[in-house]
Amino acid sequence: QVQLVESGGGLVQPGGSLRLSCAASEPNLSIKSVAWYRQIPGNQRELVAEVTSGGAMYSADSVEGRFTLSLDNAKSTVSLQMNSLRPEDTATYYCNFVLTHGEYDYDYWGQGTQVTVST
């Protein structure tokens, strides 16, 4: 069973930066896609950024130009560099790996890390 461990959340002032990391318990996984989501209480989980095994990348309009997702495929580690943070970025952030085992795909989630942007 693959486990994902997140780190890097915390409290930051508006305009500041944070870097989130997510490490899988095994290297060299068969990755179909990797993504970061975020969620605030009472709302649905929102896709923030994603990269597929084919190299296609997606960023939500709200974070375009401010957040950058990076994947180290060999180390099975993904990071999210967040710059110019705004109060509305406050949320719990989750990493997501979609892994291929044979003919099936499986979702794995990190435990979530809190990001709070406030003065």
Image (cartoon, helix red, strand yellow):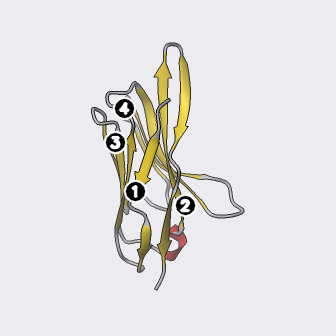
Describe the element under mark 3 as helix, strand or loop. strand
Where's residue 6, x and y in %? 43, 52
In the depicted structure, whether residue 29 falls above or below residue 4: above
For image coordinates 54% across by 24% down, the residue present is: 105
Residue for badge 1: 7
For image coordinates 55% across by 33% down, the residue present is: 107
Displayed quadrant of residue 15:
bottom left
In the depicted structure, whether residue 52 falls above or below residue 17: above
Where's residue 16, x and y in %? 35, 75
CA distance separating discs 3 and 2: 19 Å
Front position in the image: 14 or 5: 5
Q: Is residue 39 left or right of residue 10?
A: right
> Between disc 2 and disc 4, whose residue precedes?
4
Q: Which mark is residue 34?
A: none
> Between disc 3 and disc 2, whose residue precedes?
3
Please name the amino acid that badge 1 sits on. Answer: Ser
Describe the element under mark 1 as helix, strand or loop. strand
For image coordinates 34% across by 36% down, the residue present is: 76
In the depicted structure, whether residue 78 falls above or below residue 52: below
Crowd class of label 4 (few under 14; some 14 to 19; many from 20; radius 10 Å): some
Could you tell me how many numbered marks the image carries? 4
Where's residue 95, x and y in %? 48, 47
Residue projecting furthest to the right? 42
Kindly indicate whether the residue at mark 4 contacts the one at mark 3 (C-beta within 8 angstroms): no
Question: Which-is-in-front pick, marks 2 and 4?
Answer: 4
Crowd class of label 1 (few under 14; some 14 to 19; many from 20; radius 10 Å): some
CA distance separating discs 3 and 4: 10 Å
Residue projecting furthest to the bottom? 119
Q: Which mark is residue 26?
A: 4
Front position in the image: 8 or 31: 8
Residue for badge 3: 77
